[in-house]
Image: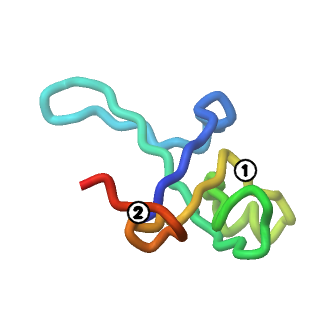
Amino acid sequence: MKAFSIDLRRIDQSRCKKITRRDGTAASFCELVIIETPESEFGDFIVKQSISREDREAGVKMPILGNGRNPKPAAEQEGEVAPW
């Protein structure tokens, strides 16, 4: 399991896929990429918004939306007792 948080205001809505569901309601899907950053002071990984191959080849950088950590079970944390 991975736990992360993102800033929803940083999502480029033009890169999101917009569809109409069978029941007629609108939906918007955003593809995210998780990149491991084990040496970072900000977390174990960063979360970026995906971009197309053409944009990637043109040198467009994916926007960083947030970061996260691999949570450790409480029993594995030093000096801590599991809450259950």
Q: For residue 54, which quarter of the picture?
A: bottom right
- Does dot 1 land on a helix, a strand or a loop? strand
The picture places residue 48, in percent across and down from the top left corner, at 65, 55
Q: Residue at x 67, y 45 (%)?
A: 65
Give the amino acid at mark 2: Ala
In this rendering, the label closer to the viewer, 2 or 1: 2
Q: Residue at x 65, y 53 (%)?
A: 67
Badge number at residue 78: none
Kindly report the distance in space between the C-alpha atoms of the residues bearing marks 2 and 1: 29 Å
Badge number at residue 74: 2
Badge number at residue 64: 1
Q: Nearer the viewer, residue 14 or 44?
A: 44
**Quick one: which residue is furthest to the left in this view?**
23
Q: Please rate how many residues cluster around mark 2, counting C-alpha atoms within 10 Å: few if below 14, some from 14 to 19, many from 20.
A: few
Q: Nearer the viewer, residue 5 or 12?
A: 5
- Does dot 2 land on a helix, a strand or a loop? helix
Q: Residue at x 40, y 63 (%)?
A: 74
Q: Please rate how many residues cluster around mark 1, counting C-alpha atoms within 10 Å: few if below 14, some from 14 to 19, many from 20.
A: some
Among numbered discs 2 and 1, the one appearing first in the sequence:
1
**Quick one: which residue is furthest to the top in this view?**
25
Is 48 placed above or below 7 here?
Answer: below
The picture places residue 39, in percent across and down from the top left corner, at 78, 74
Q: Nearer the viewer, residue 67 or 50?
A: 67
The picture places residue 81, in percent across and down from the top left corner, at 39, 61
